[in-house]
Amino acid sequence: EVQLVESGGGLVQSGGSLRLSCGASGFAISTCWMHWVRLVPGKGLEWVSRIHGDGYEINYADSVNGRFTISRDNAKNTLFLQLNSLRAEDTAVYYCASQRWLQGSSFDIWGQGTMVTVSS
Amino acid sequence: QSALTQPASVSGSPGQSITISCTGTSSDVGGYKFVSWYQQHPGKAPKVMIYDVNNRPSDVSNRFSGSKSGSTASLTISGLQAEDEADYYCCSYTSTKNYVFGTGTKVTVL
């Protein structure tokens, strides 16, 4: 069964840091783009970042560029998101999602999400 | 990158059809076929309902359909059912190699 499982969320003070992890099973993350998407309370889904299968290309949303860093360990089949200089507006449920191109350009597999709360 | 514009809420009675619009620009919705739609129930992960404008995954009911005209994409749900009550988001690839989601639409089955 294909599955993504996030971990690493929690409560952190404004200006602090967290590292999120996303473990994959049932498929190899080296074969696809991997993304982070967040659900901001009262606002909706926001795309955060993506990384190519070999890590060659990385993109970020303007709102997190320079503060967040996406990375992957293909040997451990795990995706990461380093969150630095956190702000109250970064409070959200963070999801990892795969883009395997089995269903076109869609994000076809999603994790259950991990909550990040930034206190001011 | 500004979020794509969706109506905040749409409602319908069981059996009726509803349509949700998703308006962007020529730099996102209007410029690419990479538009998808996601359904999200409270406390659950999003699920893809339509990909690449008008394609439906095999596990999604044929009551769901998608289309696009210019910079506006649309999701139609026909034969509305109670289980369709959820939040719906469109998503598009953009000219800056990013993705952008819509503002989200709450669908209520009356």
Image: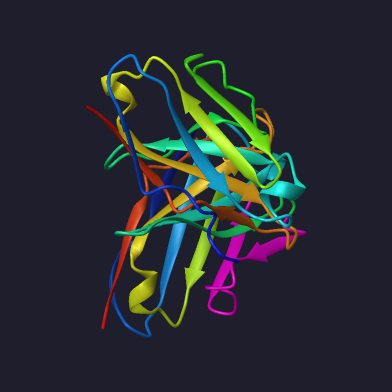
From where the camera sits, is residue A53 visible?
no
Residue A75 screen position, x and y as percent: 63, 48
Task: Check residue A64 for magenta coloring.
Answer: yes
Residue for point 54% across, 50% down: A78
Query: Taking A20 as reference, is B11 left or right?
Result: left
Residue for point 46% across, 78% down: A84
Residue B93 screen position, x and y as percent: 67, 50
Residue A107 screen position, x and y as percent: 57, 40
Give residue B103's quadrant in the image. Answer: bottom left
What stretch of residues is rendered in magenta?
A55-76
The N terminus of chain B: image quadrant: bottom right
Residue A113 screen position, x and y as percent: 37, 49
Give residue B88's quadrant in the image. Answer: top left
The C terminus of chain B: image quadrant: top left
Residue for point 40% across, 78% down: A86
B63 or A25, which lies in front?
Answer: B63
Task: Check residue B74 for magenta coloring.
Answer: no
B109 or A1, which lies in front?
Answer: B109
